[in-house]
Amino acid sequence: MMIRKCDIAVIGSGPGGLAAAIAAKKNGAKQVLLIERDREPGGILLQCIHNGFGVEIFKKDLPGPAYAQHFINEAQEVGVNFLLDTMILEITKDKRIFASNKTEGMLEIQAKAVILAMGCRERTRAQVRLPGARPAGVYTAGTAQRWVNVEGFMPGKKIVILGSGDIGMIMARRLTFEGAKVERVLEIMPYLSGLMRNYVQCLQDFDIPLQMQHTVKRIIGNERVEAIETVAVDNRWQEVPGSEEVIPCDTLLLSVGLVPENELSRQVGIHLDPLTAGPFVDNYFQTETKGFFAAGNVVHVYDLVDWVTGAGLRAGESAALYTNNKLQMNNKKIAIQHGQNVHHVIPQFLDIDSLSAREEQLQMRVTKPLEQPVKVQVTDGKEVIASKALPYARPGEMVTISLKDKHIDLLKKAEQLVVQIAEREE
Amino acid sequence: MNKNGNYDVIIIGGGVIGCMLARYLSRYTLDILLIEKESDIGSVTSAANTAIVHPGYDAISGSLKAKLNVAANPMWDNLAGELQFAFQRHGDYVVAIGEDELARLDMLLQRGKQNGVPGMQIVSADVMRSREPNINPAVSGAIWATSGGICDPFGVTIAAAENAVLNGVTILRETVFEDFIWNEKRIVGIKTNRGIFTCRRAINAAGLFADAIMHKAGVRPDFKITPRKGEYFVLDRTDFTVNNVLFPVPSDISKGILVTTTVHGNTIIGPNAQNIEDKENKENTKSGMDEVFEGAKKLVPNINPRHVIAVFAGLRAGGNAACQTPGIGYSHDFIVEIPTEVQGLVNLGGIESPGLTAAPAIAQYVVELLKDAGEKLQEKKNWNPVRPARPQFRHLTHEECDALIKKDARYGRVVCRCENVTEGEIVAEIHSPIPALTYDAIKRRTWLGTGRCQGGFDMPRVTEILARELGVSQLEISKKNGASKFLCRPTKEDGGAQ
């Protein structure tokens, strides 16, 4: 079995992994190995041929493959080593990575630090427990996206989409472009789960109806989907009797949520946060297992790729410092809790001393739509340490607040931090 | 392979019973044809059941069910060795919750003894709690039946079928029985959608449709199969597992809802039992889910619907045949017989649970019946009882994986990320003795697509490999048969939006 050694191994070459590999190299790591299971680097960006990528970082509206290519080029320029078409089977706590590919067989990769950038996966039909038959024609939106945009095939002609996630709405428009009829998008919640801009640009502009508080009651058809029976639900997700409707169609696409993909992290024994399904991380994006860093959707699911790139850059920089013994390891870290209206906060731990050199951004998702002016507040449980006003807060859109050196004194007195979103009085 | 359509024996139905019969009969110098109406063998009841090799304490004493179950159970170790399918024998448990249920364990123990089941013992609540930490704390005791086992039921079926093929049996899929051909009162052949095949004997192993075949043959006009649907839920093995096969104390009509481990390491819960009319209805329902979870939580209270990664439903081929033993009032017995009112028919029916367990003993019993009926069975000199299994990447050591990839590079490309199934395994199944021609056929043979992402990752890759290996367009690739194609057309056709 072949053995390879490197300073830093990066698992996954999507936007998080690419940025991490580049930053690791730029910050002094010698051998950086970027491992990708697909034949080309870029991750899911390669099948995201719509635009909307890079608005924050480049102030440009790029399609996914162009956004990826920018970072692929940069990674090549700075000397990142790519290992493609290679599946990782096992990672040990002492940072030995076992992988296989067609040309080298089984590989053992020994690294000083590992950056987890496996991204996320789509929730499936079974995970939302949709009743009915099990015919062909029920696909996750991402699988359909790969078929249409990479393989060049249409999954169906008459389509119902369950879930108002971003990929689902984007696929509604994409399939319409290709001549399919998207009958309807159903959303079980009383609000949108994706971005408002996708609702406007992908559904509204193409007259595709969105039905809130509706779900699939039954999938009909033994061989191929023949119809979907839908039903309205009340505020407690209970079906409303008599609201059933049968929509003839040949395809049901699911856009019912993304889950950080942490099978390998679990194998290592990295502590995962049940709220995010990703690892607990500090502001360096280091997990609770020494020398393992994590960046991007593997930590928590982002709405914009730009944020994923930002997380990757920080994780790569941190890992490079770690391998050169320059990362602050022994500082006391303060725990960050989620408070009112906040589902979770990343990072979960903060090294306050790092604030003397830079701002630290806290990232969060709200639990419900707050369609009025709100205040994002970082408190020590009682006193407000930092505050930021926003016109509204929605579950589909990540909320951030930054902590700066001016907050250090107050932070040092705190036992823990609680981040909350308060409704603002006019 | 018999080219003229003339056979000694035709087996109607390619479930575990038909395939096991084919395997046992392939030992003799007979020309055998097995027909299966679906696109793959073993894809109906044999692919969707609880996967348990029963000890035999459940069946009513004196019934054919009890006799064949108890006879079959000890055959499984050899069978698993010869046919190389997944089988584990760690016993099963009937778990009493609360003092009231404890008394019923004795009744089962007595019935087990009467049926001749070896190795049954009562274990205490404390022992049960230590063997199964997640068990309901109100457990009051259990029966541990040490001869219980678990298997991969489709794996058993395909292994038996492949062994039959390697020993000269012809298997035709998508071949639908239409009628018998008669010479007076003797069956001399069958009509199918693929034409006429002649035979000296036809064996009815049609499972859910065994009643229709009997009626075409003019035997047992009152026999009726009532499909009994059972829903199952598969739990993510990284989220929640149990270590054992756990039955509740049975009711008078059903063995109840189990919580059981599988040979794949997942925990499954189910089945409920609903009598239905439609023999194609394998739908999962909301009420079925509620019922199964309620039943499972009685044994293991912290089972959570959030841990479900897959759901399925299967149909048991429940019959209404009276037990032939005098004095036993039981009307759901197996039928395994050579009827006297017609000639040339071997008739099986009502082979519901424990049919999977009983399969090898049923096959053996049919051999005996044929001998008794004057069939001169001559053993083949070159009969090979062994069906070699193909390598499964995920079960190999790193060194074995490396050696395999060096021999065939396609084993280096992992196509299913959750279950670590490689391109090499997929290609091997497509070119196996009973080729896998659909996505589901590959899934059942390799276990790809059964993990947490449920094929989201591998599906486009598998359709591509299938198309390449079969020399067709990806548009031709289907989930289970011609009517269940994945894709409808290339993009950039049909105009598009204005």
Image: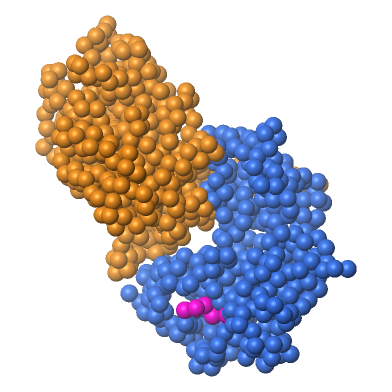
> Which of the pair A408/A160 is nearer the observer?
A408
> Which of the pair A207/A342 is nearer the observer?
A342
Location of the C terminus of chain A (image quadrant):
bottom right
> Which of the pair B122/B36 is nearer the observer?
B122
Whether A193 is among the magenta residues is no
Q: Quadrant of residue A274?
A: bottom right
Report the residue at 63% width, 47% height from top. A253
Q: Can see residue B207?
A: yes
Q: Quadrant of residue A333?
A: bottom right
Q: Quadrant of residue A27?
A: bottom right
State the image coordinates of residue A146 (x, y, percent, origin top left): 60, 56
Name the outermost residue toward the front. Answer: B99
> Which of the pair B483/A16 is nearer the observer?
A16
Q: Is residue A49 left or right of residue A267?
A: right
State the image coordinates of residue A300 (x, y, percent, origin top left): 60, 68
Looking at the picture, does residue A126 appear above or below residue B12?
below
Name the outermost residue toward the right. Answer: A426
Q: Is residue A201 left or right of residue B150?
A: right
State the image coordinates of residue B321 (x, y, percent, origin top left): 30, 19
Looking at the picture, does residue A236 appear above or below residue A387?
above
Report the residue at 41% width, 38% height from top. B271
Q: Is residue B8 left or right of residue B210?
A: left
State the image coordinates of residue A20 (x, y, percent, origin top left): 58, 79
Magenta part of the chain: A282-289
Location of the N terminus of chain A (image quadrant):
bottom left
Q: Can see residue B38?
A: no
Report the residue at 35% width, 12% height from top. B222
Q: Colour of chain B?
A: orange
Report the residue at 39% width, 75% height from top. A92
Could you say which chain is coloured blue in the image?
A
In terms of secondary structure, what is the magenta stretch mainly?
Answer: loop
